[in-house]
Amino acid sequence: MAFQIPKAVTPQALSEQMKQGKSLNLLDVREAAEWLEGHVEGARHIPLSQLMERCGELDPAQEVIIMCRSGSRSGLACELLHEKGYKVVNMTGGLNAWTSRLVRD
């Protein structure tokens, strides 16, 4: 049986929530080089390859919106974290579909 992600959000809907000032927990699971190319302001960066050893940095009581480049790695991250009891939301379409400005730092 395939894993079903409990919740998903589109990049457009997420961008709108951010514009409304909604407090969101964002997690970017792309690799370091991708992160440096640009990321969503306020997002936390934990590469998928480090997620299981660093998941303690996340609060399991708070919903976390997970993003990557296309939505594939974030889906896997959602599956891994969901199995550990985290409240997860997958940003479908990933940053390829992101329409707002990305920050670089």
Image (cartoon, rainbow, N blue to C red):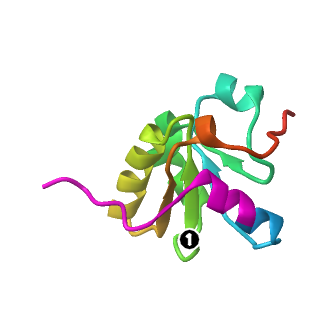
Residue 32, above or below 86: above
* Residue tagged 1: 63
Is label 1 in a helix, a strand or a loop?
Answer: loop
- Spot occupied by residue 93 in the image (x, y as percentages of width and height): 52, 43
Q: Quadrant of residue 42?
A: bottom right
- Spot occupied by residue 16 in the image (x, y as percentages of width and height): 73, 63
Residue 16, above or below 70: below
The residue drawn where x is 54% and y is 48% is 54
The residue drawn where x is 56% and y is 56% is 10
Residue 52, above or below 60: above
In which quadrant is the N terminus drawn?
Answer: bottom left
- Spot occupied by residue 15 in the image (x, y as percentages of width and height): 72, 57
The residue drawn where x is 64% and y is 62% is 13
- Spot occupied by residue 85 in the image (x, y as percentages of width and height): 39, 69
- Kind of residue at badge 1: Glu
Residue span colored magenta = 1-16
Instruction: Between residue 37 and residue 12, name the one nearer to us.
Output: 12
Q: Residue 28 vs residue 36: left or right?
A: left
- Residue furthest to the bottom in view is 61
- Residue furthest to the left in view is 1
Q: Is residue 48 magenta?
A: no
- Residue furthest to the top in view is 33
Q: Is residue 8 magenta?
A: yes
Total marks drawn? 1
Q: Quadrant of residue 64?
A: bottom right
Residue 9, above or below 93: below
Instruction: Between residue 67 and residue 57, name the one nearer to us.
Output: 67
In which quadrant is the C terminus drawn?
Answer: top right
The residue drawn where x is 42% and y is 39% is 72
Instruction: Between residue 30 and residue 84, name the one nearer to us.
Output: 30
Q: Residue 29 vs residue 22: left or right?
A: left
Crowd band around label 1 with a 10 angstrom C-alpha radius: few (<14), some (14–19), many (20+): some
